[in-house]
């Protein structure tokens, strides 16, 4: 499949999710979206309250918590500090950006990057409603981030890199924009084994955070090849409660992964 065709399918799906959520009655969602047709029997198909420590969500409006499209909590393992600059890849409605903004404080900054205009509209509306000053949302693709070299302390991402058709480009870009010694905190869908070429070609499943996922060993290998060190799979949980596994598919997990860029490593575009 051409990369742009995958981007288009993903953009259209998440644009439709953003448009379908009514501001007066937000519906909780996971990487599956607001529909339960990609979840197993009895699955809640995600709720931000099921992904995060409830204390983190205190004070966030339903407009934010109800449009949580993640598969885990990358914020709690990021070790954010006041004054740091944080980049969220595939920021969606902004939940992880707003959680990070609280931790980096007024002297810090959070940048959210998303390629879907409708999601950016939601995120900016949420920002205005909350009166948040240290968050900025930018339109762009995570394979070509609209971010300066060596400018970010921490990169977070929540159930987004699996959607990319060029994961190597994502991690090379991450190395480029991170400061020396900078770190990543990722929650993503990974597998134990690989999908067949026929399953990979199912773009609808790709956009549902399924067939774009790769084996966790291959995932961390791509990170290592890009230049990351101290790669740790913090935890790996069966994703059966948010993704319906069909016959012929490998086992699917939600994993949280951290890593660092070497202190001595500087990069340029």
Image (spheres, rainbow, N blue to C red):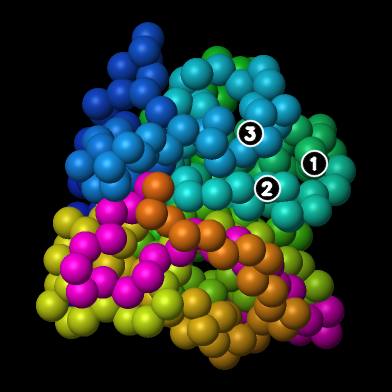
For label 1, the SS is helix
Q: Position of residue 51 (x, y in %)?
A: 56, 41
State the residue at coordinates (41%, 72%).
191
The secondary element bearing badge 2 is classed as loop
Alpha-carbon span between mark 3 and mark 1: 10 Å
Labels 2, 1: front one: 2
**What range of the chain is rendered magenta?**
242-269
Say whether disc 3 or disc 2 marks the residue closer to the N-terminus.
2
For the residue pair 90 and 159, the one nearer the viewer reads as: 159
Task: Report the disc number at residue 98.
Answer: 3
Q: Is residue 213 above or below residue 82?
A: below
What is the x, y in percent for residue 170?
Answer: 48, 71
63 vs 199: above or below: above
Name the residue: 68% across, 21% down.
58
Crowding near the residue tagged with mark 3, few <14, some 14–19, many ≥20 C-alpha atoms within 10 Å: many
- Establish if 29 lies above or below 207: above
Of badges 3 and 2, nearer the viewer stands 2
- Which label belongs to residue 184? none
Other-residue count near label 1 (Cα within 10 Å), few / some / many at <14 / 14–19 / ≥20: some
Sequence-wise first label, 2 or 1: 2
Q: Residue furthest bottom?
A: 225
> Which one is in front, 36 or 225?
36
Q: CA distance from mark 2 to mark 1?
A: 11 Å
In x, y percent, where is residue 9? 19, 55
Which label was assigned to residue 75? 2
265 lies left or right of 192: right
Which residue occupies 55% across, 17% down? 61
Q: Pointers 2 and 1 in contact (CB under 8 A)?
A: no
| Residue 123 visible to an observer of this rendering | no
Reading the image, the residue beneath label 1 is: 104
Locate residue 256: give its quadrant. Answer: bottom right
């Amino acid at each position: 499949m051409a990369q742009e065709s995958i981007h288009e399918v993903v953009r259209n799906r998440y644009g439709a999710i953003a448009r379908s959520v009514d501001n007066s009655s937000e519906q909780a969602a996971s990487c599956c979206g607001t529909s339960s047709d990609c979840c197993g029997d009895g699955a809640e198909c995600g709720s931000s309250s099921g992904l995060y420590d409830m204390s983190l969500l205190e004070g966030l409006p339903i407009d934010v918590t109800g449009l949580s499209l993640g598969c885990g909590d990358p914020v709690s393992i990021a070790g954010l500090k006041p004054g740091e600059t944080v980049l969220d890849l595939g920021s969606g409605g902004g939940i992880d950006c707003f959680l990070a903004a609280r931790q980096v404080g007024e002297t810090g900054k959070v940048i959210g990057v998303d390629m879907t205009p409708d999601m950016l509209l939601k995120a900016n509306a949420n920002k205005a409603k909350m009166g948040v000053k240290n968050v900025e949302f930018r339109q762009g693709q995570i394979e070509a981030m609209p971010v300066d070299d060596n400018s970010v302390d921490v990169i977070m991402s929540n159930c987004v890199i699996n959607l990319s058709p060029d994961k190597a480009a994502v991690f090379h870009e991450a190395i480029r924009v991170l400061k020396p010694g900078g770190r990543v905190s990722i929650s993503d869908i990974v597998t134990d084994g690989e999908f067949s070429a026929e399953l990979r070609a199912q773009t609808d499943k790709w956009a549902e955070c399924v067939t774009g996922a790769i084996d966790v060993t291959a995932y961390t290998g791509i990170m290592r090849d890009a230049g990351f060190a101290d790669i740790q799979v913090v935890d790996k949980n069966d994703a059966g409660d948010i993704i319906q596994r069909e016959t012929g598919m490998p086992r699917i997990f939600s994993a949280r992964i951290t890593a660092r860029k070497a202190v001595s490593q500087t990069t340029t575009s």
